[in-house]
């Protein structure tokens, strides 16, 4: 018996050494992946770390993960569309290029089976394949938002809403021309974090981790356009609300941004002229609001006549508080046909589904779904210039939107905070808790779709 236990322990130890060595080798492979030298941003999806995290969770809760297999109807089996013919890399790298719009994403993946890959892009992605040169083919979607150049060993792709002249860049990526190893690139400091997802560009650097029952994330950004207040304070908000949002910051003037809507426009500089650096939003619950519904009928003389009826609806009970020079702000919004100062209501175009009322003092503008809500002047100290809290379980009940509710069913609570340091950088950290605290958060998130 002792001999058997020793042999079992030795085999187990060898397996651990093997998997540890394999993991280290694949990590080294990921670091050696070549990316374009002119990449301006990078997203790394650490496939191996995700696999390990989920595998451990599967071993801890096998019944949850395999229960769908017990209910599966094998009589109606479909072809496996998950086989892509691509080799699964330790990490996937996505990037933007200096000479292309920021909405165009590039990447390169190794091909394991050329037959399987071509079958996938033709039968699953429904791309049209054309031969470009000897040994290199191109596959393109009908709208032109996905373009792939590939040979027998690898595929380089670009994806965006619209792609113009991707051929030179895709050929360079495919042939590893003008590239650098990821571990030696300008993104090496961010890649050293070893998170499930890391990202970095000129203005942002952050990460995402998919833990059991929770998604953690961080983003450090540099923006001269956001000016956090010198003193941190915020309106007192009830932590039991459906949604709480607060911003204790201003925005740089001189950007001259214009936001256009159907029959009016807003200028950012004009808004900043009156805005005093504090904005709060609370969604407490639901409230009943009566609205006039206009329909048309024909009378006995076949004349079209207007008929007005009253309808009661459950709408969000929310309030937005804006610290501002309200005299000037009210005049500007009234002039832009956004707010009617005489009736104290907001243009129906802004909130088409319900009425929004406006109240104000000399220092605060209040927009609310309640008509007689009074301005609030109580504050509390806070080290954060930005906070966002959403209770998704309450939100799911109050929205009552069948098209959206299923996607929120596994979400419980979102908490996000932002701090500004002396160097001018802004650090945003948050956590998204799931309804099931024992199961991996990525699996729960994907199972909602």
Image (cartoon, helix red, strand yellow):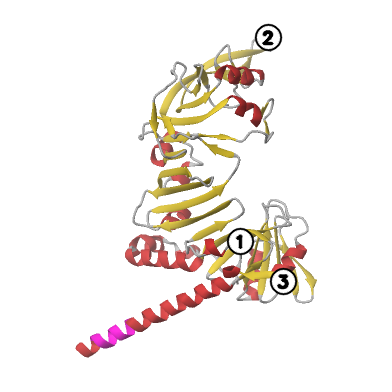
Q: Which residue is drawn at 49% across and 16% down?
A: 361
What residue span does the magenta drawing correspond to?
5-12
The question of residue 343 being in magenta is answered with: no
Between discs 1 and 3, the one toward the N terminus: 1
Quadrant of the rendered structure where residue 306 is?
Answer: top right
Q: Give the Cα separation between the discs numbered 1 and 3.
A: 17 Å
Residue 46 visible in the current orientation:
yes
Q: Give the Cα separation between the discs numbered 3 and 2.
A: 79 Å
Between discs 3 and 2, the one toward the N terminus: 3
Classify residue 175 as left or right of residue 293: right
Q: Name the residue under label 3.
A: 177
User: Which numbered marker is on residue 94?
Assistant: 1
Q: How crowded is mark 2: few (under 14 residues within 10 Å), some or many (20 or more)?
A: few
Q: SS of the residue at dot 2?
A: loop
Q: Which of 447 and 249 is in front in this view?
A: 249
Residue 414, image x and y in percent?
A: 42, 44
Q: Which of marks 3 and 2 is in front?
A: 3
Residue 80 visible in the current orientation:
no
Residue 126, image x and y in percent?
A: 67, 61
Q: How crowded is mark 1: few (under 14 residues within 10 Å), some or many (20 or more)?
A: some
Q: Residues within 10 Å of mark 3 (few under 14, many from 20)?
A: some
> Is the Cβ of the residue at disc 2 closer than 8 Å to that at disc 1?
no
């Amino acid at each position: 018996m002792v001999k058997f236990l020793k042999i079992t322990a030795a085999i187990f130890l060898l397996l651990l050494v093997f998997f540890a060595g394999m993991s280290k080798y694949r990590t080294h492979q990921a670091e050696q992946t070549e990316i374009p030298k002119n990449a301006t941003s990078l997203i790394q999806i650490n496939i191996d770390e995700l696999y390990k995290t989920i595998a451990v969770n599967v071993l801890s809760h096998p019944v949850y993960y395999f229960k769908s297999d017990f209910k599966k109807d094998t009589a109606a089996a479909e072809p496996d569309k998950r086989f892509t013919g691509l080799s699964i890399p330790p990490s996937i790298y996505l990037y933007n290029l200096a000479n292309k719009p920021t909405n165009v994403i590039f990447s390169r993946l190794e091909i394991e089976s050329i037959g399987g890959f071509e079958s996938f892009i033709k039968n699953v992605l429904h791309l049209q394949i054309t031969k470009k040169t000897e040994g290199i083919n191109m596959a393109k979607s009908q709208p032109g938002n996905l373009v792939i150049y590939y040979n027998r060993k690898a595929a380089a792709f670009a994806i965006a809403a619209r792609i113009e002249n991707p051929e030179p860049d895709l050929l360079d990526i495919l042939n590893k021309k003008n590239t650098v190893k990821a571990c030696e690139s300008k993104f090496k400091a961010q890649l050293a974090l070893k998170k499930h997802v890391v990202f970095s560009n000129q203005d942002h650097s952050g990460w995402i981790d998919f833990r059991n029952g929770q998604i953690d994330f961080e983003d450090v950004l540099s923006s001269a356009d956001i000016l956090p207040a010198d003193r941190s304070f915020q309106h007192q908000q009830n932590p039991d609300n459906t949604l709480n949002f607060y911003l204790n910051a201003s925005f740089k003037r001189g950007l001259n941004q214009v936001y256009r809507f159907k029959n009016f426009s807003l200028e950012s500089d004009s808004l900043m002229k009156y805005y005093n650096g504090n904005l709060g939003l609370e969604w407490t619950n639901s409230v009943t609001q009566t609205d006039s519904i206009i329909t048309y009928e024909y009378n006995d003389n076949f004349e079209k006549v207007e008929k007005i009826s009253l309808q009661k609806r459950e709408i969000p009970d929310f309030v937005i508080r804006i610290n501002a020079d309200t005299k000037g702000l009210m005049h500007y919004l009234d002039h832009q046909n956004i707010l009617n100062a005489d009736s104290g209501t907001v243009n129906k175009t802004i909130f088409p589904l319900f009425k929004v009322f406006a109240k104000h003092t000399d220092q605060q503008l209040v927009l609310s779904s309640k008509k007689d809500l009074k301005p609030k002047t109580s504050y509390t100290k806070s080290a954060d210039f930005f906070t966002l809290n959403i209770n998704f379980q309450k939100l799911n009940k109050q929205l009552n939107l069948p098209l959206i509710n299923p996607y929120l069913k596994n979400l419980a609570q979102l908490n996000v905070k932002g701090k500004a340091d002396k160097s001018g950088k802004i650090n945003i950290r948050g956590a998204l808790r799931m309804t099931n605290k024992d199961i991996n958060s990525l699996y729960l998130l994907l199972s909602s779709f």
